[in-house]
Image (cartoon, grey):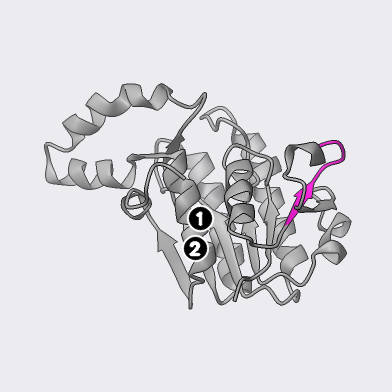
Amino acid sequence: MINEVFITGGTGYIGSRLVSVLMKKNFPVSALVRNSSEEKLPEKVNVVFGNALDASTFADKIPPSKIFIHMIGVAHPGPRKKQQFIDVDLKSIQQSVTAAKDKGIEHFIYISVAPSDIMKDYSDVRMQGEKLIYESFSRATFIRPFYVLGPAHYWPLLLTPLFKILSLSKSGREKAKRLGLVWIGQMVNALVWAVENPAHGIRILEVKDIKKFPKKY
């Protein structure tokens, strides 16, 4: 049975690609968007207008979906964006959890991040997001990339030599695996797999798991 999917962040870097793939697979998709952003979505997507930072603007518009995917976040996360992480990333997941409660959601999918001291503020906010979901939904998938490579997001390839150096020691090897780089296609395919294979409890996909998916979507 094909379940309906409700998405926040469906016009973003990962979201726009995910929506297109889900539509090709004939999933009924509803996407939360701001006014004037609907043209970024495929024609057959059910457009839900609202503010991702205010649950009252879209909670009563969520159709009887079985799967909720949250992908709202600050573009190009960086060490100097702590307040933006709080104002956007944390606020949006708080509002999504509030809006999705008691809506019959059977599987909540959340793009989190690999825990790291390198981006501690960002990591802390995403861990808070995971906690909120864990406390409200019995079935969820947390996908934890460190950095997603793709169009206009290639600069971390410069870190490749660093990962190789880290891999020379056992502790460094584990850290390199946890903070490895993944491709946009791998993320999209991981998300599609999560949609097609709902978790039976709380499931976490780490970098090593994401890398098992194809780079092309």
Q: Secondary structure at mark 1?
A: helix
**Residue 52 visible here:** no
Judge by depth and name the residue closer to the eye, 61 or 179. Answer: 61
Quarter-wise, where is residue 169 in the image?
Answer: top left
Q: Which residues are magenta?
A: 30-37
Can you tell which mark lies on residue 26? none
Question: What residue lies at 45% left-to-right and 54% top-to-bottom?
Answer: 190
CB contact under 8 Å: marks 2 and 1: yes
Task: Find disc 2 in the rendering and name its residue.
Answer: 194
Amino acid type, callout 1:
Leu
Question: What residue lies at 44% left-to-right and 51% top-to-bottom?
Answer: 144
Residue 162 within the magenta-colored segment of the rendering = no
Mark 2: few/some/many CA within 10 Å (<14, 14-19, 20+): many
Mark count = 2
Residue 35 within the magenta-colored segment of the rendering = yes
Mark 1: few/some/many CA within 10 Å (<14, 14-19, 20+): many
Task: Find disc 1 in the rendering and name its residue.
Answer: 191
Image position of 22 with respect to 116: above or below:
below
